[in-house]
């Protein structure tokens, strides 16, 4: 199951905080559902537990006869969808009138979500029928996809009033209300009641941050190793040229010792070379001697070298 599916599954298992929360949850599902009134359809979903959740709410609150139609799709990836429908048109019309979910201009009836717990339930219902969340392993993105412009605007304003800094964008003849960063998404999930999903997202974020930090350190170390190897290769080339042209034994004692040590230990860092000298010196001291050897090698290449007496 996808991360988004896990969130909806967890939301469908949240117990209502008060009797009116059931009404609020059903209201959220019906108001944001994209179904038409053909076949007295109320909710259409690809998740059975969402359909079951809607049926339970309808049965408890209306006592009406509810039918769930199952649709199988023939494709490369077998999928199944569920349509929650009412058997009796009179019951359907009464429910529609009560919740205003077939009004031409849909707006949120604040009388049905006055308490904070009721708004949470309303939000759960809305997310189950029009919400989704991207796999946080890939990116942080939670959204509600709303067909009706007035409802989208009304809903976005309401979310902002509850402290959620949502953004909106037009997409496919509708409006997307979304959050992009991990912390506000965690807050949204916790507020709706998907606490376990929120904790899982936090853990994923921590692991991603640690992995990114390790990668940065590894890349830095790799770059440093590369620089050390390249520098050592140039030093060896210079020393071998000196050995071929005049012989290392012709160098001053301090340079001869560093040259011999480098030839014997091509993989050593400057810091390690410091410690191997008969009289240890600083890293900058070793580097200075290697630069003097490089200068001698350059003079030999240009036939300008004069041995120091």
Image (cartoon, rainbow, N blue to C red):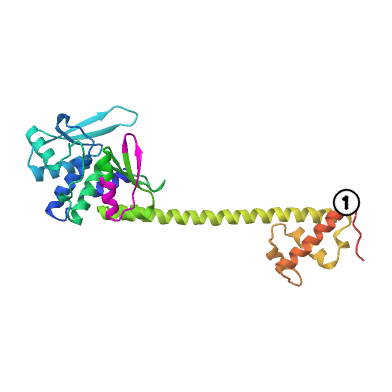
Confirm whether residue 111 shows in the render: yes
Q: Going by the image, does 258 lie left or right of 45? A: right
Counting from the top left corner in percent of width and height, residue 175 is at 31, 40
Circle 1 SS class: loop
Foreground residue among 129 and 218: 129
The residue shown at (21%, 46%) is 125
Foreground residue among 253 and 101: 101
Confirm whether residue 260 shows in the render: no
Counting from the top left corner in percent of width and height, residue 234 is at 75, 53
Q: Going by the image, does 244 lie left or right of 179? A: right
Is residue 158 found inside the magenta-colored segment of the image?
A: yes
Foreground residue among 148 and 92: 148
Counting from the top left corner in percent of width and height, residue 78 is at 30, 31
Residues drawn in magenta: 154-174
The crowd level at tag 1 (other Cα within 10 Å; few <14, some 14-19, many 20+) is: few
Q: Is the C terminus in the top left, top right, bottom left or bottom right quadrant?
A: bottom right
Q: Quadrant of residue 269?
A: bottom right
Q: Is the N terminus in the top left, top right, bottom left or bottom right quadrant?
A: top left
Location of mark 1 (residue): 302
The residue shown at (80%, 65%) is 257
Q: Going by the image, does 23 lie left or right of 174? A: left
């Amino acid at each position: 199951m996808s991360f988004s599916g896990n969130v909806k599954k967890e939301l469908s298992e949240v117990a209502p905080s008060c009797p009116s929360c059931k009404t609020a949850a059903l209201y959220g599902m019906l108001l944001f559902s994209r179904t038409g009134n053909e076949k007295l359809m109320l909710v259409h979903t690809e998740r059975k537990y969402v359909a079951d959740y809607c049926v339970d709410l309808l049965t408890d609150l209306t006592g009406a006869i509810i039918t769930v139609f199952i649709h199988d799709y023939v494709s490369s990836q077998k999928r199944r969808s569920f349509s929650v429908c009412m058997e009796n048109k009179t019951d359907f019309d009464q429910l529609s009138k009560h919740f205003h979910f077939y009004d031409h201009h849909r707006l949120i009836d604040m009388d049905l979500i006055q308490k904070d717990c009721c708004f949470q339930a309303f939000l759960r219902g809305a997310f189950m029928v029009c919400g989704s969340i991207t796999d946080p392993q890939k990116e942080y993105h939670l959204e509600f996809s709303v067909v009706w412009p007035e409802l989208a605007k009304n809903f976005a304003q309401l979310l902002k009033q509850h402290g959620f800094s949502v953004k909106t964008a037009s997409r496919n003849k509708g409006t997307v209300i979304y959050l992009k960063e991990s912390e506000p998404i965690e807050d949204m999930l916790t507020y709706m009641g998907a606490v376990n999903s929120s904790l899982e997202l936090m853990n994923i974020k921590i692991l991603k941050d640690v992995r990114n930090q390790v990668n940065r350190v590894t890349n830095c170390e790799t770059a440093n190793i590369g620089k050390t190897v390249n520098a050592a290769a140039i030093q060896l080339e210079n020393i071998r040229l000196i050995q071929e042209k005049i012989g290392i034994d012709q160098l001053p004692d301090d340079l001869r010792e560093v040259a011999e040590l480098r030839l014997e230990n091509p993989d050593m860092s400057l810091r390690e070379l410091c410690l191997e000298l008969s009289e240890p010196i600083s890293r900058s001291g070793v580097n200075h001697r290697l630069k003097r050897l490089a200068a001698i090698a350059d003079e030999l290449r240009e036939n300008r070298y004069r041995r120091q007496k």
